[in-house]
Amino acid sequence: IIKQNLAKLAELTGHQYKLYEYYGAADATRVIVAMGSACETIEETVTKLNQAGEKVGAVKVRLYRPFSIDDFVNELPATTQAIAVLDRTKESGAVGDPLYLDIKTAIIDAIENDNAPFTHLPVVIGGRYGLGSKEFTPAMVKAVFDNLALTKSLRKKSFVVGINDDVNHNSLTYDPNFVSSNPNNFSGIFFGIGSDGTVGANKNSIKIIGENTSLYAQGYFVYDSKKSGARTVSHLRFGPNIIKAPYLIHTAGFIACHQFGFMEKVDVLGNAAKGAIFLLN
């Protein structure tokens, strides 16, 4: 029923959604499975890594319940050797997190019933991301793929990325300087104080660029619920290609500070790229 209605939606809107959707190299050996906005970040990173000669891919889960085993396994490349399943939850006391358990069961079931695209069981490991509302960046995605490439003795079977797990020591280390976004995109961070006009001006800028030029645009605005008088930080991106980056800017080519006092209290250049432009307004 769901597939029939997705087909109707495609006829009406032109947007084709599948229950499970693969993205990446046709002969990928390492695959990440995830749900939600993390898939945008993973997709962007997969493109960057494949351009560098790696063979990686990702499966985006759009339908979790009910779970269709056949539709899922048919999205996996026949060359798949290792799979990392990402959950944004911590099921304490369980043998694994929800999506990880379902994916592993689905693959074993498909192999037993001769419905899988491969004959041998791939390595399937589970990991957690985004705990404590932490960011999920391309650098972390690369760390997950790098972990899959390790030998059995070195690979972390149950890992966490994005937080420092100083209890179980299951954290994956990653290079925060790894960036997968299009180098032609503009990325800027603006520091201001609530009610000084910075956020409003940036929202207008994004609207003007998005509606009146051929560029794609994105804006994220970080501020306290009591915005007036508190620090605000605006993250703006725009460029010629679709922006698949649901995370804050960590390497900005342009940084603006609209309050002189921040210069002594805030590391306003902490996220500046090499050769970035700094505007003290």
Image: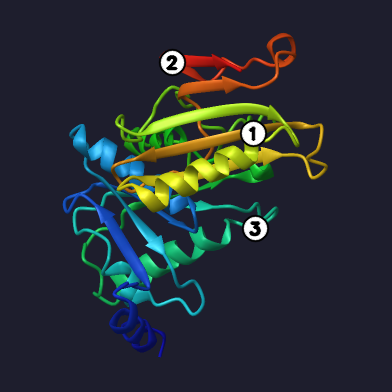
Residue designated by label 2: 276
Residue designated by label 1: 198
Q: Up-down: is 64 above or below 194?
A: below
In the rendering, at what x and y percent does residue 258 appear? 65, 22
Q: Residues within 10 Å of mark 3 (few under 14, many from 20)?
A: few
In the rendering, at what x and y percent does residue 261 appear? 75, 14
Label 3 and label 2: CA atoms lie apart by: 47 Å
In the rendering, at what x and y percent does residue 218 appear? 47, 45
Mark 3 vs mark 2: which is more N-terminal?
A: 3
Q: Answer left or right for 180 relative to 118.
A: right
Foreground label between 2 and 1: 1
| Nearer-the-camera pick, 228 or 88 | 228
Question: Dot 2 lies on which element?
Answer: strand
Q: Up-down: is 83 above or below 103?
A: above
| Nearer-the-camera pick, 214 or 122 | 214
Q: Please identify the quarter of the rendering in which residue 264 is found.
A: top right
Question: Dot 1 lies on which element?
Answer: helix
Question: Dot 3 lies on which element?
Answer: loop
Q: Residues within 10 Å of mark 1 (few under 14, many from 20)?
A: many
Q: Up-down: is 9 above or below 77?
A: below
Name the residue type under label 1: Thr
Name the residue type under label 3: Ala
| Nearer-the-camera pick, 251 or 234 | 234
The disc at residue 94 is: 3
- Report the quarter where the N terminus lies: bottom left
In the rendered image, is residue 220 in sight?
A: yes
